[in-house]
Structure formats: C-alpha cells, structure tokens
Amino acid sequence: MDFLDGASENSWVRLVPKYLATVIGGASGEPPNEYIAQAGLHDPNVGQSDRIGFVRILYIAQLLKYDGFELAGRSLVRQLSADHKLRLCGAVVEDDSPLLAGHLSEYVVPVRDMTSFDVVYMEGGWNHSDGHPIRVPFDSVKNFVFQGGQLIVADAGRYYLEDHGSAVDEAQEFLGAYFPSREEGVRYLYDIGAEDSKGSQRFRPELMRIGDRFETIWTGIDSILTLGSIAIAPREEILGSGHSSTAVMISDQFVDRNFPSPWASIKTYGGGHVVLIAASVSADFLVDRNPDNARWISNILDAVLDRSRETAKWLKPGPGSGSALDPVNVLQEDESQQHERKSSFLTPVDSQRADVNRKVLQESVGKSIAALANTDGGQLVIGQADDGEVLGLAEDFRCLGKLQSRDGFTQRLADYVGKFMSPNWEYIGINLDWVEQDGKDVAVVNIPRCALPVYLDTQSASEVIFVRRGTRTERLQGRALGEWLSGPRFLAK
C-alpha cells in the first residue's frame, strides 16, 4: 500500500486504487491519476481533548457520485495531511441513511462521527440546490460548529453560484455573509500584471483590508491564487479582500467601489467559527502553481482553533459573571433584578394554546436577556413558571426537528440572539447550565453584565434598549434612554 507524503500507516489518509471513480479530474482539468486520496476509518482511540500538534480534518470532496466522488484538491489534501490527520469523504449523511449500507458506504460519513473531528472542510462550496444530493445536513453542521467545531466552506465562487446560489441564499445567516450579486467578480482594474493566466487572480495580503483578530492567517503568505472570486458582504470579519487596484466586474463592466471588495469572511457561531471563501482556492492547478494556498488554509485552521480555545475559557462562568448561584439551587430563588423566569421559549407549555403568538414568546425571552445584560447581569430560568412550578421544556424540544435535545435548544436560543441582538452571544459571554428535576429539563441562562449597550430588534422597532428595574423588564426611551447611554458606565469606554 502506498501512502501520502508525510503520512504514516496509522494516518487516516491513505491512497487506494482508483477502481470506482471514473471522473476524478475535477476542477483541475487534468487526467485522472492512478490513485486518489481516500479515507480510512478514524482512530477510535483519539479523543477531542487529545489533539496535540495536529488538527483532525473531515475533508468533503467536491461531489459525491454514483461511483465514488469527484475530488478537485488532491494536492491540497496531500499538503494538509503532512501536518494534520485528515479523512476524505464525498458527503456527511444522516445516521440512518441507506448510503451507509450501500455500495457508497466507504465514501460517506455518518453525522455521529462528526464529533471526532476538529474541522470540516467543504471543497467545492456549500450544499447543492434542490435536486442534488445534500453534502452535509444543515442542522447537524450547525450543531457541530456551535459545540466548538470549525467549518470552512471553500470554492463558493462564481462557478459554484451559477448552479447552487439558492442554497447559499438559504444559509447566509449561518455562513456569515451574503452576496450582493452573484455576478460581482473581484477583478484587477489597473495592474494587469497581478492577474494570472487562465483567468485566475493573485491577491497579496499586504494590500488587503483584513480583520485585526485574524491577521495571523497571513503570516508567511506571499499571495493567494484564486479563480472566480465573488464580492461578499461579511456580517463580522474580513479574511481576504481585493485592494485599491481591484474593482468588481458586473456584466463585463468594471465598477469601482472605492473600497476593497471582500471575498473571504469569518463568523463566530457558538464555540466555533464559519469561514466562507467565495473563490476557488482548492483545485490542483491553483495549489500546484501557488503552494501558499495550502499554507493559508492551514493557518486558518490553527487560528480558528486557537480562538475557540480562548473563547471556551472566557465563556466559563466566573466571579461577577452573573452565574454565582448553584444551578440546582437557582430553582429556589425568587424573581429579582438579577433573576427572571420564563415558562418556555419556542412554544406555549400548553400545546393546545394555539392563540399564543410564538414570536411574542421568543421576543419576551430576548427582552429578558437584553435587560439583564444591560443592568447587573443574572440568570434567566426557562422552563419554570412565575410561581416557581417546574414545567420543563418538553414542548420546546418537540419544535427542534431532528435536534430535540439540550444542544438543539441551546443552538436555537443562540440563533435568536445572533439574529436579533447586538452585541452577539459570544461577546456578551452568555452560557447555559441545565437542571433536571422530576425528569424535566430546565435551562439556566447565565448572562453577564455587558460592557456595551445591548440592543434588541423587536417586531415593532429596531435597536431597542431594555433594562431591569426590580422584578420588571422595561424599555428605555426618550430622555431616560439618553441619560442612560450618556452615564458614566459607557462614557468610561
């Protein structure tokens, strides 16, 4: 048996004869090689906390086919496997998928195995549009990232969007960026020497506008060679962009935007991150001509994992975080300026109450979280009535689709906060404890006092401020709002 360069016989990645796949050239346009990189089973003796010096990568190839999969980035796989443990597959499927028992079983990975990896790398863009196989179940990958996993969606450029743009549109909130237009290519306007052959573009980091938190991903990188780069509007931080001599091309016409057009972004989601690269960077002909592409991807892996480890530390409750109470004893506490109760979040406890507006329920929880963060911090207990009766969250769990669990509930709550509240879940430092009483799950949301004003978008108004006054949650408006914002708490910032 032959093995990849830099990989040992115990590595997850090995070379096997290419006897099934018939179209493996992928985006490289090269003839199929005698061998393709193919996954072995992951090492069951390696746990999430045992990762020292390497990253465990689940690499999803460009396309799952009836006879195997199409892999565009053989060179990228080889380079990443030299430093990390990597498993290659064509798709992630539900645990009960018939593919796990069929002739494609060695080419797919069940959802349950995702927790064995630190990073999921999606070559060839995000999921495909209707009528095409799903590459990874949406709810499952959201849960993976929320629990501290990292997702890199690469090659989501012009050629991917031509066929699957609607799939990106549906997931743009999670991916952390949207596409103002699927035709806005980031192209060089003046220095034609920076434009490579075959229509590719070479971007240099010293000319980019990059977010401060992730500047390290460009350490030792001279340039990135891309194809089909598309301008995006990041919701959080820019990882790669054009510069003063680039513009966007729409319908074969240059449009100078007077600012660098981003084509790569990163978003924090729970304990993990979502990286979106709206350009082809994985294909062999790009990596072979510019090995910095692979080094850049490796730098991203290290940076997001380091950031998640830091986040995990400061999200743990500590002195003054509003989490000093024992989670079990918290059910005995009376409501106060730092303690609030809600019966449910997603649906009425009484499933027969069809007259109750679910958006009103969710907004009520959002108001309490924002108010506690704007005042002294504290706990919001969800699953307990105002009179102290423990109700549990069974009805809410039933609204969670396939993730009817504590993790699913936490993820849904964080999704709500991320969509309607600013700053976000991670900046505020929100975390959840769980209490079980008489077989009923109760969520204890620990909310620190936030250093910045926390705004909530409600059904009737945007960027509303709520505070706690005794046992009440109140909206600040007019003069009271102005006095609060101009007070010493924020002037000191």
Image: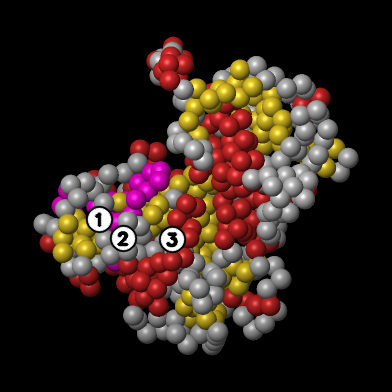
Q: Is residue 363 left or right of residue 259?
A: right
> Picture coordinates of residue 484 (x, y %)?
46, 16
Q: Earlier in the sequence, mark 1 or mark 3?
A: 3
Going by the numbered disc 1, the residue's amino acid type is Phe
Picture quadrant where residue 466 is located: top right
Which residues fall within the magenta stretch?
Answer: 221-246
- Tell me if residue 6 can be seen: no
Element on which disc 3 rests: helix
Q: Which mark is residue 169?
A: 3
Going by the numbered disc 2, the residue's amino acid type is Ser
Which residue is pictured at 50% across the width and 34% down the height?
456
Q: Is residue 184 magenta?
A: no
Q: Earlier in the sequence, mark 2 or mark 3?
A: 3
Q: Nearer the viewer, residue 103 or 294?
A: 103
Q: Is residue 423 left or right of residue 343?
A: left
Residue position marked by numbered label 1 in the rendering: 203
Element on which disc 1 rests: strand
Residue position marked by numbered label 2 in the rendering: 181
Badge 3: how crowded within 10 Å, few (<14), some, or many (20+)? some
> Picture coordinates of residue 485 (x, y %)?
43, 19
Nearer the observer: mark 1 or 3; the answer is 3
* Quadrant position of the N terminus in the picture: bottom right
Q: By what rule are the colours in the image chosen?
A: secondary structure
Q: Is residue 480 above or below residue 331?
A: above
